[in-house]
């Protein structure tokens, strides 16, 4: 049983007060949880609670009456681990639930009554008073249009005027309404509590529907499955979000005569959590499927406390089985938005808040004062809510400033997710969280990023500028250029020693390597090498440097202590890049014109073998995984990359090339070996690949500066740096990109010299013990 299963069983449907009124008969113990007494309610909701009999082997049934009218059974009895924990094993299968569209009722006060029987004694009766709200007088809204709306605060209520209520029936005129929202502590949601409809006709705009009519069902044609089902909540929209206590609901029936639905299980991320009550009357489903009488009793629904899950994306759904053993799984991907990143708020105070309509579709609240349960700490957050048709309710949306780290965010407000300057690779300082500010030529990203300006002692980025004949030095905490080092002509490659003390820069037009002291950021000496040196790499032990000479078809081996050339190694035609294996025993050189990779024995400085990649590949960039088992070769001419099995002896190509990009050129692999980042010149992007699966899969594309070349990752993998070489070296930018969401984290790219090409990171200094 994994952690999700354990946590969900204990908490997802739990954290409820297991209290009950005095039952009419001792044989039945029951609690009606929702709706609460005298609740003002609209839209899709749930009649839910739990009930069990103390008499062994008895069946409990629950019926719902609305204003004295029998509306049919409430499905019973699903698993309730929280009730069983408090009352014993006989209470495990005690949960009851039925989805109801409360807007089907006439606007105003109603009496709900539950009759709970155990076929032994007289029924237990529980009554509730509710007030039904019909926005625009409609039973089911297609949308609440906020395009012309205005929002303001009235005490602890939000008033939104000039809202356009659009009925699901296209033939019905829209209605302008004023709605009031308020925070509901028991459900941890922002709920619509009043609607002031324009004109007296609005309340009667649509006739009330039967209580068993939940929504508008559109029948799908050509359904091949024997189990016909829809998961209505959470919705299957790409931007679906949930928060607080909400619904998992839908409907299901078998199209086979005599076959019933045996069970419906709630699922989270592929794990079945527990059985749900099924199957209650759904007249809307029966109306859409008139040729299937069994469609009437098809509804299932349960209230889920989504706040028991951390803010993240989840697959939430159901697994359905019929009486013939046929099963069907329906899952929708949704994002849990947990305000303040806490399970429960004891305070949601709007006394200092501001309200506005954002973008014509969302309600934005700023300066909300919140206090988590059991805490005395009060802090401010922002929140954004949007109307969602499937539940006829307002749901929280992902937002920088709401205190929860949603997918794509690195942090949010004071919530840093356990990170600090030191965990990100700096030696000290204070990590904060910020949103990238909007500028006239930069579209702000509505997500939160780590702000490292107050961090100290981090890695330093060195960038070769081919046209500028220089190297730019960048402070990675502040993302600013701190120095520019003049070097030889056309510097194309750069590598830094493991101790960070020395940088080696190839000067292609001078046929030499400039050796730079990274403490003073000055060239201390130059060493002649072969013709047109390109890529360069330092051995893991720091004793040797390999420089590829593209016009000499060779690799120069340089002793780092004596600064003397110790060997010249013949390789293939027009070599471009070189990389050492993690153990330093081998190096791998890409030969552009030969379509090969040379495998070099670094102990003897000789070629062990040559790996043929196939015709028209033009290999350029190369990187080795941290475990030393695979090398990835970027094929500039082949618009692809090849994978080498370097654990094999001899080294061999593993599988077919993976198609990618237009003139892909360089590659960086994450420190954990799970991701590869490859620059594509003519597409001006970096492709992101998952290396943990087979086949290797593209997972993202990141837009970059024009015609990128070199790429490198920060030591902890949170930042991707991309050199924007540009056309013929007219670029001047280095992009700083979050690997969490693929978005830039600076207002503008870092401005460097002309033709930024290769990148290298000087390690952060080691803190004193």
Image (cartoon, helix red, strand yellow):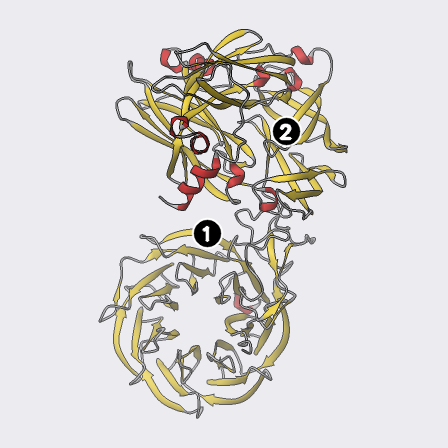
> What quarter of the picture does the N terminus occupy?
top left
- Give the percent coordinates (x, y) of residue 117: 44, 13
Vertical arrangement, residue 669 with respect to residue 766, above or below = above
Instruction: Say which element carries label 1.
Output: strand
Left or right of residue 446, residue 50 in this image: left
Q: Quadrant of residue 131?
A: top right
Which is more toward the observer, 314 or 649? 314
Vertical arrangement, residue 299 with respect to residue 371, above or below = above
Residue at label 1?
700
- Residue at the spot x=37%, y=63% of the render? 635
- Give the percent coordinates (x, y) of residue 526: 50, 89
- Residue at the spot x=32%, y=52% of the render? 695
Residue at label 2?
191
Question: Pointer 2: residues within 10 angstroms few (<14), some, or many (20+)?
Answer: some
Vertical arrangement, residue 440 with respect to residue 199, above or below = below
Q: Quadrant of residue 530?
A: bottom left
Gap in Å between the C-alphas at discs 1 and 2? 37 Å
């Amino acid at each position: 049983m994994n952690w999700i299963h354990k946590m969900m069983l204990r908490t997802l449907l739990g954290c409820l007060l297991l209290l009950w009124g005095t039952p009419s008969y001792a044989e039945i113990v029951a609690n009606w949880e929702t709706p609460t007494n005298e609740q003002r309610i609209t839209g899709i909701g749930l009649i839910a609670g739990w009930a069990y009999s103390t008499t062994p082997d008895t069946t409990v049934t629950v019926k719902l009456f609305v204003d004295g009218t029998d509306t049919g059974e409430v499905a019973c009895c699903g698993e309730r681990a929280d009730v069983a924990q408090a009352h014993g094993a006989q209470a495990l299968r005690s949960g009851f639930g039925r989805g109801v569209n409360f807007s089907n009722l006439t606007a105003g006060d109603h009496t709900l009554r539950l009759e709970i029987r155990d076929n032994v004694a007289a029924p237990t009766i529980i009554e509730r008073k509710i007030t039904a709200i019909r926005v625009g007088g409609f039973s089911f809204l297609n949308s609440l249009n906020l395009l012309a709306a205005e929002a303001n605060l009235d005490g602890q209520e939000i008033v939104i005027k000039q809202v356009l209520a659009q009925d699901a029936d296209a033939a019905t005129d829209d209605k302008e309404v004023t709605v009031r929202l308020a925070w509901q502590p028991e459900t941890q949601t922002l709920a619509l509590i009043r609607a002031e409809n324009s004109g007296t006709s609005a309340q009667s705009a649509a006739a009330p529907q039967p209580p068993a009519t939940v929504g508008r069902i559109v029948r799908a044609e050509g359904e091949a499955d024997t189990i016909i089902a829809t998961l209505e909540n959470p919705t299957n929209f790409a931007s679906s979000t949930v928060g607080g206590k909400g619904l998992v609901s839908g409907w299901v029936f078998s199209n086979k005569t005599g076959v019933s639905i045996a069970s419906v299980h709630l699922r989270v991320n592929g794990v079945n959590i527990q059985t749900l009550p099924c199957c209650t009357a759904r007249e809307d489903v029966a109306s859409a499927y008139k040729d299937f009488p069994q469609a009437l009793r098809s509804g299932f629904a349960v209230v889920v406390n989504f706040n028991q899950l951390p803010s993240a994306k989840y697959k939430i759904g159901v697994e359905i089985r019929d009486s013939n053993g046929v099963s069907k799984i329906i899952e929708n991907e949704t994002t849990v938005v947990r305000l303040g990143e806490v399970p429960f708020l004891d305070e949601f105070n709007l006394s200092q808040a501001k309200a506005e309509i954002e973008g014509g579709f969302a309600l934005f609240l700023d300066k909300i004062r919140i206090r988590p349960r059991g805490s005395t700490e009060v802090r401010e957050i922002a929140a954004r809510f949007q109307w969602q048709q499937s539940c006829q309710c307002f749901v929280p949306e992902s937002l920088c400033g709401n205190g929860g780290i949603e997918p794509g965010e690195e942090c949010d407000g004071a919530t840093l997710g356990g990170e600090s300057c030191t965990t990100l690779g700096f030696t000290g300082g204070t990590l904060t969280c910020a949103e990238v500010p909007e500028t006239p030529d930069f579209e702000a990203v509505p997500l939160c990023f780590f702000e490292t300006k107050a961090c100290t002692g981090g890695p330093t980025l060195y960038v070769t500028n081919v046209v500028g004949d220089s190297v730019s030095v960048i402070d990675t905490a502040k993302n600013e250029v701190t120095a520019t080092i003049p070097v030889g002509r056309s510097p194309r490659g750069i590598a830094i020693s493991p101790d960070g003390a020395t940088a080696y820069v190839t000067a292609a037009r001078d046929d030499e390597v400039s050796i730079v002291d990274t403490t003073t950021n000055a060239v201390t000496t130059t060493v002649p090498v072969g013709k047109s040196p390109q890529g360069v790499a330092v051995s893991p032990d720091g004793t040797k440097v390999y420089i590829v000479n593209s016009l000499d078809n060779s690799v120069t081996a340089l002793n780092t202590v004596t600064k003397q050339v110790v060997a010249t190694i013949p390789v293939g035609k027009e070599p471009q890049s070189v990389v050492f294996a993690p153990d330093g025993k081998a190096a791998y050189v890409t030969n552009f014109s030969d379509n090969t990779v040379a495998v070099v024995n670094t102990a003897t400085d000789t070629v062990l073998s040559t790996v043929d990649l196939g015709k028209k590949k033009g290999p350029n960039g190369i990187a080795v995984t941290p475990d030393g088992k695979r090398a990835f070769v970027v094929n500039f001419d082949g618009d692809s990359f090849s994978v080498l099995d370097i654990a094999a002896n001899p080294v061999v190509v593993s599988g077919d090339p993976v198609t990618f990009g237009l003139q892909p050129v360089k590659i960086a692999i994450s420190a954990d070996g799970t991701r590869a980042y490859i620059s594509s010149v003519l597409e001006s992007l970096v492709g992101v690949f998952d290396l943990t699966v087979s086949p290797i899969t593209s997972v993202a594309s990141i837009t970059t500066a024009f015609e990128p070349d070199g790429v490198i990752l920060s030591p902890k993998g949170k930042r991707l740096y991309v050199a924007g070489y540009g056309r013929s070296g007219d670029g001047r930018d280095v992009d700083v990109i979050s690997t969490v969401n693929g978005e830039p984290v600076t207002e503008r790219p870092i401005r460097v010299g002309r033709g930024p090409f290769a990148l290298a990171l000087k390690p952060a200094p080691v803190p004193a013990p």
